[in-house]
């Protein structure tokens, strides 16, 4: 009797890219290859975008990192053993700490790390390294909306409601969000809604809109104030909701009264009639939502701008009403969980404040150390990168899950600071532009080779499951942190290497915090329960909280706070030398710094190089033709790319995607001016000039 055919291994997991975390089913192995199919998961409902369909291709990247590398005296990275690599790192870290103090070493994490990795990295930095110098690349993504949401509602969760609630919306305002390219499966939840899109570009999302407001870059705050002005003056507010559920309305309105529609039009370029139409569409809807994205937040006034859109939502009575709401469209795959469990400069697990004595005592108790031994808050992401190698700044940096040589603003300067370090260590699975500059490179597992959890933009905790066994000499990030911690004198039990054990400790550390995961465990997740935080440990088991704020906000008095904000303009104005605005963003085929997607043939073929989108009249004035090479220059630096003529662009604005390295890196010209509350750089607005280049220029 013949043997039955072997079953193809398969797992139910999630896409490795954005925070929508589409459900997927992986099958196959290394020999036969891995295939992906969309799952009937609530966020994607059986659909995937181009990146999701091609995600398995990265698993077989030709230049996959499979052995540790150490830079030799001749300047080349050479293969070595794990023991030598970890001994080298630990030895240099000990030397630097002994000579200069604990803050001479630093760690930099990422919004794509699992909850377990983010948690253990924060613990490792504060205990094994003893440093206050830790932050992560999520500071470049969601920090402004997070700060505004926490101030308004008492807690920050990207969407305080499930994505599926959007399907019941009559009207949705998307401010600075191009979800048709950045989160394509989300668009199916907006099919029946009338869209209002605020974006300087006529994006694919704006093409679907009933109303497109096209403000000058850097003027979104003035526009939000104007919409609140119209809402109040035209009697469109929900007075009972404001009276019963909020504080601070009068102060917010006092600022908005100075922004009448005609003044807003003069500043933003959005016609007064269009402003009024937008306000009336929102007010007339039975179910209305206001969603903000990076276009609103990546500015030096990003927190105030997000707060102004929250003010508008509160004035209309939307958040926690059951018939609409406000949300931030978190970007990175674990952008939500990544900012909850301790890899931010000012936070402890459970979204606790590092300066809160009770929070410090609780987490220190879980870790088995005195509260006073925990360092205080350190520098935010760009401040940390800018301080590298300087007096009083770190001399060593460990990077997990980030590629700041491409993704950080003022990128040439950041590359110089990284080069000035005594020690740069990068843990990655492909040789990113940052990894190529490192002194030690540690090969770690990819998404389909590891277990763990992530938290989607709607606060739902999800299981990542492994299909493949890692290559022989590849380790998990948890194993790397364990190996370094032990070499630095920490007890081995303090740094578990099993994700389930790390998650159980995370649960205890988060207990009682704003992001309480204590009632969530792998058993419940593996059984398919939909568990949104907060989910405290209770008997009977807590069902999780898919919808926040239905009864009260999380401030002690249960009320939301209006913010008193005013438009102050961008950090950098156009001038005779730099007469144009440049804004950056994503394109459909690529993700973040492109380290993964540029290695996928189909995605690279769809978008093989950066393009400068420019209005034909603007191009003609600059003396550049379509498909010709051109240079974009700011006060900080220049990048080179080909021209893409686009008659829908504002004549005063250029658009360049940020996924590309080298001379095509948009972040060579971006502005590191920071939002004073969130530490967010002003990615979305730089004053630049456009110049032609001869075709021979590489």
Image: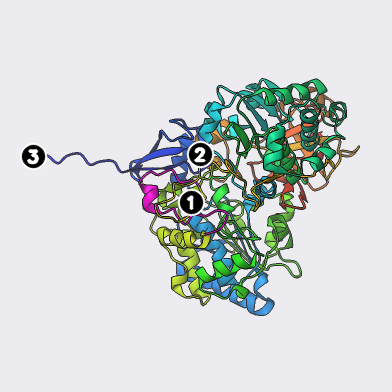
Q: Earlier in the sequence, mark 3 or mark 1?
A: 3
How far apart in space, not on screen, are marks 3 and 1 (Cα)? 53 Å
Q: Which mark is residue 535?
A: 1
Quarter-wise, where is residue 238 in the image? top right
Residue picked out by circle 2: 600
Q: Is residue 88 left or right of residue 660?
A: left
Quarter-wise, where is residue 235 in the image? top right
Closer to us: 142 or 285: 285
Disc 1, SS: loop
Label 2 crowd (10 A; few <14 / some 14-19 / many >=20): many
**Does the magenta run of residues contain 523?**
yes
Q: Main secondary structure of the magenta part?
A: loop
Closer to us: 476 or 335: 335
**Can the viewer see residue 587 in this picture?**
no
Q: Residue furthest left?
A: 1
Q: Report x, y in % for residue 692.
A: 79, 33
Disc 2, SS: loop
Query: Vertical placement of 147 versus 378: above or below?
Result: above
Identify the image's colour scheme: rainbow, by chain, secondary structure or one colour: rainbow
Residue at left offset 38%, top offset 43% = 528
Residue picked out by circle 3: 1
Q: Is residue 145 left or right of residue 550?
A: right
Query: Vertical placement of 551 versus 354: above or below?
Result: above
What's the magenta region? 512-532
**Can the viewer see residue 521 in this picture?**
yes
Q: Residue furthest bottom?
A: 98
Label 3 close to label 1 by CB (< 8 Å): no
**Does the magenta run of residues contain 650?**
no
Disc 3, SS: loop
């Amino acid at each position: 009797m013949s043997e039955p055919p072997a079953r193809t291994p398969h797992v139910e997991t999630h896409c490795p890219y954005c925070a929508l975390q589409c459900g997927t089913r992986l099958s196959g192995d290394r020999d036969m290859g891995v295939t992906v199919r969309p799952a009937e998961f609530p966020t994607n409902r059986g659909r995937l975008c181009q990146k999701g369909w091609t995600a398995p291709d990265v698993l077989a990247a030709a230049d996959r990192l499979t052995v540790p590398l150490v830079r030799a005296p001749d300047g080349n990275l050479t293969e070595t053993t794990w023991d030598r690599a970890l001994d080298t790192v630990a030895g240099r870290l000990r030397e630097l700490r002994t000579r200069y103090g604990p803050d001479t070493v630093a760690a930099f994490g990422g919004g794509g790390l699992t909850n377990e990795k983010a948690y253990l990295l924060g613990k490792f930095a504060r205990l094994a390294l003893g440093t206050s110098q830790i932050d992560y690349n999520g500071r470049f993504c969601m920090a402004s909306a997070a700060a505004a949401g926490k101030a308004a509602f008492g807690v920050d969760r990207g969407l305080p409601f499930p994505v599926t609630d959007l399907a019941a919306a009559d009207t949705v305002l998307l401010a600075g969000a191009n979800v048709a390219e950045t989160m394509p499966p989300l668009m199916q939840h907006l099919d029946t809604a009338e869209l209002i899109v605020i974006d300087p570009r006529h994006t694919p999302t704006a093409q679907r809109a009933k109303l497109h407001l096209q403000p000058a870059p850097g003027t979104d705050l003035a526009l939000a104030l104007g919409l609140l002005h119209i809402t109040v003056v035209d009697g469109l507010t929900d007075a009972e909701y404001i009276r019963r559920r909020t504080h601070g309305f009068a102060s917010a309105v006092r600022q908005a009264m100075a922004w009448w529609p005609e003044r807003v039009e003069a500043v933003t370029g959005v016609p007064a009639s269009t402003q009024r139409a937008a306000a009336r569409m929102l007010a007339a809807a039975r179910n209305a939502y206001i969603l903000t994205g990076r276009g609103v937040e990546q500015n030096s006034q990003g927190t105030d701008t997000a707060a102004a859109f929250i003010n508008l939502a509160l004035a209309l009575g939307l958040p926690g009403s059951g018939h609409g709401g406000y949300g931030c469209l978190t970007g990175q795959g674990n952008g939500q969980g990544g900012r909850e469990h301790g890899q931010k400069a000012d936070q402890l697990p459970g979204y606790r404040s590092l300066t809160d004595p009770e929070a410090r005592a609780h987490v220190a108790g879980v870790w088995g150390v005195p509260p006073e031994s925990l360092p205080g808050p350190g520098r935010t992401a760009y401040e940390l990168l800018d301080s590298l190698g300087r007096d009083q700044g770190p001399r060593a940096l460990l990077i997990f899950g980030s590629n700041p040589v491409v993704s950080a603003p003022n990128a040439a300067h950041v590359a110089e600071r990284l080069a000035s370090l005594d020690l740069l260590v990068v843990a990655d699975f492909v040789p990113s532009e940052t990894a190529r500059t490192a002194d030690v490179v540690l090969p770690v597992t990819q998404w389909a080779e590891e277990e763990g959890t992530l938290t989607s933009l709607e606060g739902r905790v999800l299981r990542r499951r492994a299909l493949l066994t890692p290559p022989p000499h590849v380790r998990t990030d948890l194993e790397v942190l364990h190996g370094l911690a032990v070499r630095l004198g920490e007890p081995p039990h303090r740094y578990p290497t099993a994700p389930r054990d790390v998650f159980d400790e995370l649960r205890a550390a988060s207990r009682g915090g704003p992001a309480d995961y204590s009632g969530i465990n792998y058993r419940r997740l593996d059984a398919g329960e939909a568990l949104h935080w907060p989910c405290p440990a209770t008997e009977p088991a807590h069902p999780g909280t898919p919808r926040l704020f239905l009864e009260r906000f999380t401030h002690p008095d249960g009320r939301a706070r209006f913010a008193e904000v005013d438009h102050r303009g961008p950090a950098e104005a156009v001038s005779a030398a730099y007469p144009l605005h440049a804004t950056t963003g994503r394109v459909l085929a690529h993700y973040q710094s492109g380290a993964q997607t540029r290695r996928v043939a189909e995605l690279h073929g769809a978008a093989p190089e950066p393009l400068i989108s420019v209005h034909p009249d603007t191009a003609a004035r600059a003396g550049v033709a379509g498909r010709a090479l051109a240079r974009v220059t700011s006060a900080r630096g220049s990048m080179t790319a080909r021209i893409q003529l686009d008659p829908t662009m504002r004549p005063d604005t250029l658009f360049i995607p940020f996924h590309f390295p080298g001379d095509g890196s948009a972040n060579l010209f971006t502005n590191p001016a920071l939002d004073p509350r969130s530490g967010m750089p002003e990615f979305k607005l730089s004053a630049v000039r456009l110049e032609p280049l001869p075709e021979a220029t590489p």
